Image (cartoon, rainbow, N blue to C red):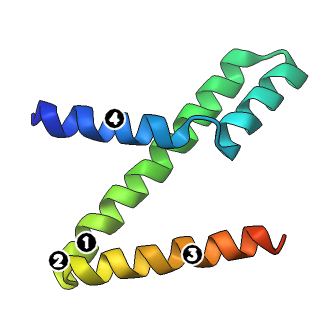
Amino acid sequence: MDWRLFMTTFGVIFLAEMGDKTQLAAMTMAASTKKPVAVFIGAALALICVSALGVVVGSLLSDYLPMIWIKRVSAVAFIVIGVMILLDKF
């Protein structure tokens, strides 16, 4: 286990997820249903599945595409999503 990589990944993902829509949705669901354990388990499993998908797709893409193109496509996707959010289309 590469502990430095583990801690870096944990820190980056933890900070990126603080205050995002997922966290706000989980807070709202837990408050409205009064069933925080069910909300926690559902949210945790969903985040695990999404993260696993990202890791698998990222590792597969790295076998076929140069890293610079993966970064460029990711940057364009973030910009497009940001513009869509600004225009209230997302």
Res. 10 mark: 4
Q: Is residue 90 visible?
A: no
Question: Considering only order in the chain, which callout, 2 or 4, is on the residue closer to the N terminus?
Answer: 4
Lateral position of residue 9 relative to residue 87, left or right: left
- Alpha-carbon neighbours of circle 1 within 10 Å: few (<14), some, or many (≥20)? few
What residue is shown at x 38% (from left), y 51% (from top)? 52
> Are circles 3 and 2 on residues that touch, CB within 8 Å?
no
> Are circles 4 and 2 on residues that touch, CB within 8 Å?
no
Residue 36: name its quadrant. top right
Q: CA distance from mark 4 to mark 1?
A: 21 Å
Question: Considering only order in the chain, which callout, 1 or 4, is on the residue closer to the N terminus?
Answer: 4
Q: CA distance from mark 2 to mark 1?
A: 5 Å
Q: CA distance from mark 3 to mark 2?
A: 25 Å
Q: Amino acid at mark 4?
A: Phe
Res. 60 mark: 1
> Are circles 2 and 1 on residues that touch, CB within 8 Å?
yes
